[in-house]
Amino acid sequence: MTFHQAGQRIGVMTTEPVGMLDYLAPEGGVGDGCIVICPLGPRRVMGVVWGRGDGSFDLSRLRKVIRVVDAAPLSDELREFLGRAAEYTLTPMPLMLRMAMRAPDLDRPPAERKIITRAGPEPSRMTEARQAVIRVIAEHGGASFAPSELAQLAGVGSGVVKGLVAAGTLAEITAPKDLPYPRLDPGLPGKALAPDQAEAAGSLRRAVASGSYGTTLLRGVTGSGKTEIYLEAVAEALRTGRQALVLLPEIALSAEFLDRVEARFGARPGEWHSGVSRSERRRLWHMAGQGEVSLIVGARSALFLPFRDLGLIVVDEEHDSSYKQEDTVYYSARDMAVLRGAVASAQVVLASATPSLESWVNAASGKYGRLDLRSRYGEAELPEMATIDLRVENMPGGQWISPTLARAVEARMARGEQSLLFLNRRGYAPVTVCRACGEQIGCQQCDARMVEHRFQNRLVCHQCGETRAIPETCPTCGVEGRLAPVGPGVERLAEEVAARFPDAKTTVLSSDLFGSARALKETIAAIAEGDTDIIIGTQLVAKGHNFPKLTLVGVIDSDLGLQGADLRAAERSFQLMRQVAGRAGRVSGERPGLALLQTHQPDHPVIRAILSGDDEGFWDAEAAMRQQAGMPPFGRLAGVILSHPDAAAVAAFARHLADISDPIREAGAELWGPAPAPIARIRGRHRMRMLIRAPRQAALQQAISDWLTPVKLPVNMRLSVDIDPQSFL
Ligand code: ADP
Ligand code: ZN
């Protein structure tokens, strides 16, 4: 790290669109990576010391850094990672830097802070507002909060919090600034591992101990002990004094995971995701930089934390599409984890029962190591799988549970076992149609149909979130009482289940039905306890929960994911159905679980691959098809998305961009489009897309940059580039 004496020229990467600017180092000097506050015009802005500065400004005209923020400097490793990630994703550096500076109140670190904590019994006078405050604290496991944050989370005024302090229910205390996390002890004994588990764990331990970079695909069916094994890699990182990061796709679902960490290492890890309070996030960010937290469990953005010495990154469920961010900065956390691992000389473990084709191919080519766990741990076996051919079942209109599936559910109920009915569609019905005029109710802002959510009694646009009350009369023809739901969603399926199995206890698991992460966790825990007969769920249930009494999985519509122009339709549907089917276990010693797939296409290659359990065969075939078409991971793709309130303006501008796309062709790549995006309008903005396909070795980013950097965007035009797109909508 270079140190700059007071008054020397330094280059500061600001988090403003201007990016890098030269300043004079402040009194006392400053080192590379330090976070500083600088003057910019009349404003103060934040930035990071990046080096000596490029000298483009006369020294005598430079302004001085105002002050250095009290935080650990961003390491060389992190700055290099951010630079390379910015280059790869074609993200302006200031935006990328912001990803790493997401500590609340970073610019004003309090030496001490006031926090509110639970201190006494409930007040004698209870109001709804007071109840809300008390509930927030309870829902966060008795955590303490800054007064304003608590009021905000509870949706009440600050007076309510003050009132509760006066009543003695809460207390305001002065807390020291951010405290280190309790130490995790890698010396505690882990579970005794089965031979193939021990072999895999040993291999990961040696890799971590080497202190160098490497990526390993850890593959094994759900329940084979992948978590158990990568926790051994975490233990090794802790032993060598380096930090570890575990990324999970749906962090809300990690209660069970945190318990396992605590059981293994004697303390809980740091948590980083949107459900964590501001003060906790602040604390975690600072402790990561000071090396005072050794294991962090987080959502994708945890990858940008300022670790002091990161030695291991685990990406669990590495195939999960939520690792791809498609907003402001377009990036894949899985791919960026590999990049950060390489920069940090850290080991990367990609864990999955159904890896992405990319990781599969990388492992096959030897770029990644590969560890395979062949069986479930202990007794459990993979479920039996079979299709239910909907073409021959007797299905009354408006019903989605076939007689065969219904009988299987009844048999489980008779034995006190659980069944899961899986339908990957939130809401009551995907389409609401007017029987008088035939019109479907659409969103006014988007080219999307409104989805009926009966529990909330509203129509919801799944594109933009716009909602409105379910109308009595058709908005198009004005006829009353003829609007009808078409097709099933989980809520409607729940209705059918209630009518069909009146004695069953049912639970619907759908992301929109839970007000808080804690409520969801509690429901999941209750299901695991056996407190339900039939679970009705969206893909929320596909993630790794253990429901010991669950022995039957019925997939209501296996055809949903098979169609579609999406490059990954087959891959996704294979992964999802595999994961869901894997939920069915055997109750100790009994017959194995059963998965039944309702389909109109029992002979579809994806369905057949799922049934036969031949994933190697499926992946080989899928890889061969992609290779032939020059598609990822054998070729490269980039999406270019334009949007503007005016349809003609965006079409004309897209044409213009295509006309000047010589740099793309010169790089040996092809430009497809422009064409209206499949969802041609979102939130009132018209959208056009282009797709670039390049050979694997082409300098794709450079070509796009040569093409688009000189372009000046018209007013109100938005342009995004999506390298390695996952979504083509
Ligand atoms: P995966 O991550 O592959 O789904 P887990 O690591 O969650 O698998 O293991 C599945 C279940 O089996 C967990 O409850 C876990 O504690 C248990 N398990 C796995 N390996 C062992 C072992 N060697 N000894 C005891 N329990 C184990
Ligand atoms: Zn909408």
Image (cartoon, rainbow, N blue to C red):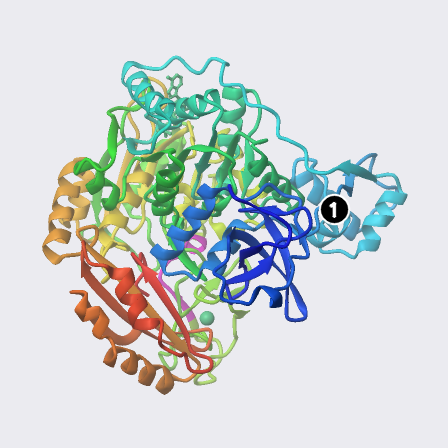
Splitting the image into 4 quarters, where does residue 42 fall?
bottom right
Where residue 225 sits: x, y (%)? 35, 24
Is residue 488 found inside the magenta-colored segment of the image?
yes
Magenta extent: 484-492
Specify few, some or many for label 1: CA neighbours under 10 Å numbering under 14, 14-19, or 20 or more: some
Where residue 14 sits: x, y (%)? 55, 59
Where residue 231 sits: x, y (%)? 42, 25
Q: Residue at x 59, y 31 (%)?
A: 292
Up the image or down, 190 lies above or below 651; here it is above
Q: Determine if residue 290 is in view.
A: yes
Q: Residue at x 29, y 48 (%)?
A: 402
Which of these two is toward me, 152 or 704? 704
Which of these two is toward me, 395 or 105? 105
**Residue type highlighted by circle 1:** Ala
Which of these two is toward me, 422 or 417? 422
Answer with left or right where residue 201 lies relative to residue 299.
left
Q: Residue at x 17, y 42 (%)?
A: 619
Mark count: 1
Q: Residue at x 19, y 61 (%)?
A: 694
**Which residue in the structure is indicated by mark 1?**
146
Which of these two is toward me, 586 or 176? 176
* Picture quadrant of ligand 1: top left
Is residue 526 found inside the magenta-colored segment of the image?
no
